[in-house]
Amino acid sequence: REARETLTAMKARFDRYQVLLYEGWLLYYEGDFDGAERAWQTMTEKYADNWFAWSSRGDAYAHRAMYDEAIKMYREAIRLQERPRFTDNESSIAQLCRLKGDWKGAMEAYGRVIDILREDWDLTDGEDVRRCRESIEACRRALERAQA
């Protein structure tokens, strides 16, 4: 009830993608999965140029273990992002690829994270770069085991 009241107040004051995002989550947790999907679809239609909306829809799909759909949403968010870009969407794709056992896809996504860090943030070393390189190597080993 409190969440519904807050959402109603938000709708009256704001015209932002978050209103539809939260509405979708409320519907989802009420068990209206079709309603949640309609809210999230409307969100990305109404705010089609907003990468945050697409990323949020990707998060909703990832939460529901709809990994391929989530990856599509994250890719659209990446396409829309202006520089300097954030790495969250590529990192999410890498994690989902790992969950699916798509080791090559995960390696490619980690590589794109490294590219963004270098191209947009002028980072060529450090914790984030090192972690991505270690993840690429872990995925390479997993791929070799899977192919053996």
Image: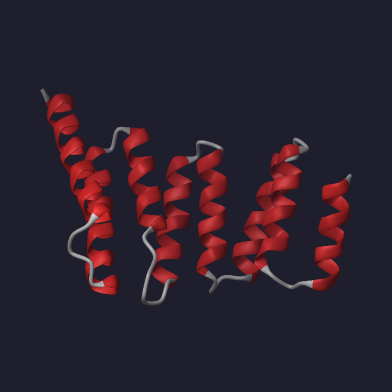
Residue 106, picture quadrant: top left
Q: Nearer the viewer, residue 24 or 122?
A: 122
Q: Is residue 5 left or right of residue 120?
A: right
In the depicted view, which residue is nearer to us: 113 or 126? 126
Q: Quarter of the image containing the C terminus?
A: top left
Q: Nearer the viewer, residue 56 or 3?
A: 3
In the rendered view, tell whether residue 58 sits above or below residue 10: above
Residue 106 vs 20, above or below: the answer is above
Which quarter of the figure has residue 97?
top left
Indicate the position of residue 116 as horizontal and vertical percent values: 28, 66
Query: Which residue lies at the image location 45% right of the left edge and 64% below the top edge?
Result: 77
Q: Nearer the viewer, residue 44 or 89?
A: 89
- Relative side of 10 to 67, left or right: right
Residue that sits furthest to the front in the current view: 126
The residue shown at (85%, 51%) is 4
**How is colour applied across the structure in the image?**
secondary structure
* Quarter placement of the N terminus: top right
Q: Position of residue 70 (x, y in %)?
A: 47, 48
The vertical placement of 82 against 114, above or below, is: below
At a point 67% along the width and 56% down the height, the residue shown is 21
Q: How many marks?
A: 0
Q: Position of residue 147 (x, y in %)?
A: 13, 27
From the viewer's perspective, tell me whether residue 23 is left or right of residue 46: right
Q: Which residue extends farthest top?
A: 148
